[in-house]
Image (tube, rainbow, N blue to C red):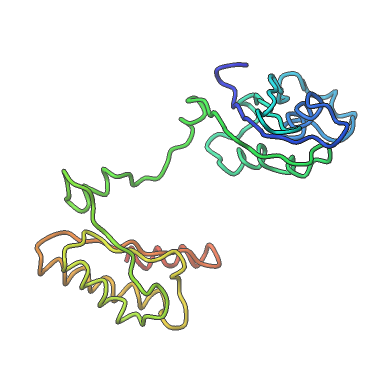
Amino acid sequence: VLETDILAAFRMTPQPGVPPEEAGAAVAAESSTGTWTTVWTDGLTSLDKYKGRCYEIEAVPGEENQFIAYVAYPLDLFEEGSVTNLFTSIVGNVFGFKALRALRLEDLRIPPSYIKTFQGPPHGIQVERDKLNKYGRPFLGCTIKPKLGLSAKNYGRAVYEGLRGGLDFTKDDENVNSQPFMRWRDRFLFVAEAIYKSQAETGEIKGHYLNATAGHCDEMIKRAECAKE
C-alpha cells in the first residue's frame, strides 16, 4: 500500500461457497482493471501497475459471513479533480457482482495528493463574508416558506421582510425553480427589489441565494447571464 493510494473499506457478504479472499479479490478487480473473463488486450498494458489490490480482510464481529475487505487503488486510475470518475469506479457496477450477496462501502481514504486536484467552489466562507461585510459572528439566514405556491411578488415580499428584520441573507429551497406560479425571471426581479430596499432601510449589505438549476444546461447559463446583467 502506497501513501498515494486511494483506500476503500467494503463490508461484503459473499455468495454461499465463495471464500472471502476470492470475494475481496473480485471486488478489487471489478472496481479497477478486471472484468468477468480474460481478454487478449490485457497483454497490452501493465495490469500489475494499475489493478486494485485487496490487501486485508477482517471478519465483522458478531455477524455471520460478513467481512471487511480493504482495497488499495493506484492514483493513476482516477481523473484529477473528478468526483464523478472517482465514485463511478469505486461505487459502480461492482455492487451488482455475482460473487457477492451484499456489498457496502464503509470508508474511504483519499490522499492529499488527490484532494489537491479538486479546486473547490470559487466562493468560500471568506468570500461570502467579504461580499456581505459581516465578520466576527455566524451568518443568519433562512429559506423562504412556503417553498412552493407563492407568487413572485409575494416571494419577494417575504424576502424583504426577512432581510429588513435582521437576516443577512435568504435563499431558494432546492425545488424552487421556474414553475407556472413563479417564473425564474420574475422571482429574480422581485428578490432584487427586496434586497435593494432592505439595504437602503438597514444600511447593511444583504443577499439572496437563487436556485439557477434547470432542465437544460443552456437554460442554466441563460439564468446566470440574466442575473449578471
124 left or right of 102? left
| 154 up-or-down from 13: above or below | below
Q: Where is residue 44 shown, x and y percent of the image?
A: 82, 24
**How many numbered discs sit on the rendered protein?**
0
| 23 up-or-down from 185: above or below | above
Q: Quadrant of the N terminus?
A: top right
Snapshot quadrant of residue 199: bottom left
Q: Where is residue 65 shown, x and y percent of the image?
A: 76, 32
Q: Where is residue 64 shown, x and y percent of the image?
A: 74, 33
| Residue shown at the point (26%, 75%) measured from the top left | 158
| 7 up-or-down from 199: above or below | above
| Residue shown at the point (35%, 72%) measured from the top left | 145
- Is 44 or 39 nearer to us in this picture? 39
| Residue shown at the point (40%, 63%) measured from the top left | 224
Q: Quadrant of the C terminus?
A: bottom left
- Is 167 or 46 nearer to us in this picture? 167
